[in-house]
């Protein structure tokens, strides 16, 4: 069952990341506070809500960034690590989104503090991760309108 502030997701699809591969090869031990099973990104439906979770409902279709455990049938994640899955995406496609796009969001809007109306979209950004998925995320992600919060 989920703890306070968490949701329990019935996993329909899980992403595969470099840490997952290295963990399965025995070359990347899971952090002490992480679920020992691999799986950092999932897509599925919310099965249960922890205390204090008001933004989601049981049955909502979500994609989420997990702290391990995404390869299981059920995965517990902080509710704040979930995003709604757009109808245009399959569960398999949605499971490949969180790690890349949460990283882009964190770097562009939280660390660099890019603000609405600061630049005209589409903007040009220095792309430092040319050989991994973050490059793709930074290249194709800029929204038509800047987020406001």
Image: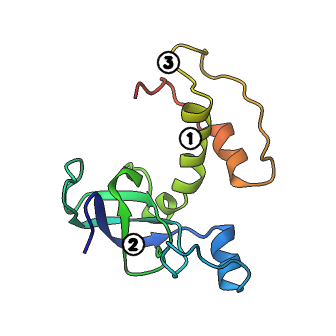
Which numbered disc, 1 or 2, marks the residue that appears first in the sequence?
2
Q: Is 2 situated left or right of 18 in this image? A: left
Where's residue 38, x and y in %? 55, 77
Per the rendering, the mark at residue 58 is: none
Of residues 13 and 21, which is closer to you in this image? 21
The residue mark sitting in front, 1 or 2, is: 1
39 to 85, vertically: above or below: below
Per the rendering, the mark at residue 116 is: 3
- Classify mark 2: residues with Cα within 10 Å, few (<14), some (14-19) or many (20+): many
Residue shown at 56% from the left, 47% from the top: 101
Per the rendering, the mark at residue 106 is: 1
Where does the C terminus fall, quadrant-wise?
top left
Evaluate if marks 1 and 2 touch, with contact meaning CB atoms under 8 Å apart: no
Quadrant in the rendering for residue 18? bottom right
Q: Is residue 82 visible?
A: no
Residues under labels 2 and 3: Cα distance? 35 Å
Q: Is residue 3 visible?
A: yes
Q: Secondary structure at mark 2?
A: strand
> Which residue is disc 2 drawn over?
12
């Amino acid at each position: 069952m989920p703890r306070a502030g968490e949701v329990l997701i019935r996993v329909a699809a899980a992403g595969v990341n470099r840490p997952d591969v290295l963990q399965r090869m025995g070359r990347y031990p899971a952090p002490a506070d992480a679920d020992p099973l691999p799986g950092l990104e999932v897509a599925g439906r919310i099965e249960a809500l922890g205390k204090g979770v008001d933004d989601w409902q049981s049955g909502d279709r979500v994609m989420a960034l997990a702290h391990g455990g995404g390869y299981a049938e059920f995965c517990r994640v902080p509710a704040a690590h979930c995003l709604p899955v757009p109808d245009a995406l399959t569960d398999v496609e949605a499971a490949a989104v969180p790690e890349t796009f949460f990283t882009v969001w964190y770097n562009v809007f939280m660390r660099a503090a890019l603000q609405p109306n600061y630049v005209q979209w589409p903007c040009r950004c220095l792309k430092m991760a040319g050989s991994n998925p973050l490059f793709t995320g930074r290249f194709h992600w800029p929204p038509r309108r800047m987020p406001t919060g």
